[in-house]
């Protein structure tokens, strides 16, 4: 309950910042919508002459792309905006201030900022996805909606855990600011169905396996193609990697040297 109150206050502070820097917010909205449109429409163009690919109908691939926009958009709105700052926080000694606060450091690092401009990209992706649900003539039950939301939350946890584990290494190598760019590129691979990654060499597929579950499992649930093992796989990997991220962060903090050092 304490952290809920703190996060509510952070939401208010972040929203207040919008009124102070309106021009920046408007620019962010335009950029977010432009990138969202490019992301969605690029797949429309790429699949314009394809009826089926890797066992997926064209409309199913486009729905998959819409789900990518929703899940990744929410992740960028609440989490990646903070992940991008970790290198800066470590290089400039700001972690010292966070460690001095009566808050869990991982939570403080992960949830301090919110990118409200991403709301428009998420809403655009929701509308895009609903359109292809209509074209596919899918009958979505209330239970499916609830389960899809739950799976999407686990997918976001999985994506967050992968990012946080990778960025924790910056405690030893604080100048590797390009790691965030690499993670953005790595994350973009989640926009393709799992069957695409299965065409790769087996050990590369194993590396990409957690990422392929991020969008694949919630979308397959909407399409009534998901299996119980796939749901369990997403749950186990997301919870397992979240635990690893927690343990690895606490371990890494033992090697952190403050700015004063």
Image (tube, rainbow, N blue to C red):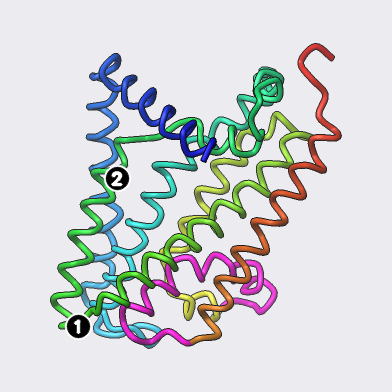
First along the sequence among labels 2 and 1 = 2
Place of residue 88 in the rendered image (x, y in percent of width and height, measured from the top left): 61, 25
Within 10 angstroms of label 1, few (less than 14), some, or many (20 or more) residues? few
Q: Write down the quadrant of residue 176 in the picture.
A: top right
Report the residue at 51% width, 37% height from top: 111
Indicate the position of residue 162 as horizontal and vertical percent values.
61, 54
Q: CA distance from mark 2 to mark 1?
A: 30 Å
The residue wearing badge 1 is 139
At 51% across and 51% down in the image, what residue appears?
A: 185
Instruction: Please identify the dominant SS of the magenta region.
Output: helix
Mark 2 touches mark 1? (CB < 8 Å)? no
Q: Is residue 206 above or below residue 224?
A: above
Dot in front, 2 or 1: 1
Left or right of residue 123: residue 3: right
- Of 172 and 20, nearer the camera is 20
Q: Is residue 13 magenta?
A: no
Please tell me whether mark 2 sits on a helix, a strand or a loop: helix
Q: Residue at x 48, y 65 (%)?
A: 214
Q: Which residues are magenta?
A: 200-227
Residue designated by label 2: 35
- Asked whether, in this view, residue 159 is left or right of residue 151, the answer is right
Residue 39: assigned label: none
Residue 255 in the figure: left or right of residue 148:
right
Can you give x and y, in whole percent of width and height, for residue 40 in the image? Answer: 26, 58
User: Is 221 a magenta residue?
Assistant: yes
| Other-residue count near label 2 (Cα within 10 Å), few / some / many at <14 / 14–19 / ≥20 | few
Residue lying at the far top in this picture: please name it.
260
Left or right of 61, for residue 85 = right
């Amino acid at each position: 309950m304490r952290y809920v109150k703190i996060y509510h206050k952070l939401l208010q502070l972040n929203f207040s910042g919008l009124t102070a820097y309106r021009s920046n917010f408007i620019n962010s909205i335009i950029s977010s919508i432009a990138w969202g449109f490019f992301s969605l429409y690029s797949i429309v163009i790429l699949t314009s002459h394809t009826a089926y690919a890797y066992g997926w109908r064209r409309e199913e691939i486009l729905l998959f792309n819409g789900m990518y926009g929703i899940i990744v958009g929410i992740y960028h709105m609440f989490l990646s905006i903070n992940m991008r700052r970790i290198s800066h926080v470590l290089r400039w000694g700001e972690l010292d201030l966070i460690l001095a606060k009566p808050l869990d450091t991982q939570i403080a690092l992960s949830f301090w900022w919110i990118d409200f401009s991403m709301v428009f990209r998420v809403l655009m992706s929701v509308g895009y996805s609903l359109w292809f649900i209509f074209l596919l003539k899918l009958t979505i039950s209330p239970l499916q909606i609830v389960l899809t939301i739950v799976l999407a939350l686990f997918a976001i946890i999985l994506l967050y855990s992968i990012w946080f584990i990778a960025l924790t290494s910056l405690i030893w190598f604080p100048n590797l600011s390009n790691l965030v760019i690499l993670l953005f590129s790595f994350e973009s691979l989640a926009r393709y169905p799992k069957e695409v990654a299965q065409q790769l060499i087996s050990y590369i597929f194993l590396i990409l396996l957690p990422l392929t579950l991020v969008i694949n499992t919630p979308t397959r649930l909407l399409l009534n193609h998901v299996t119980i093992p796939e749901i369990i796989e997403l749950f186990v990997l997301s919870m397992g990697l979240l635990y690893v991220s927690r343990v690895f962060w606490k371990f890494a903090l033992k090697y952190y040297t403050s700015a004063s050092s």
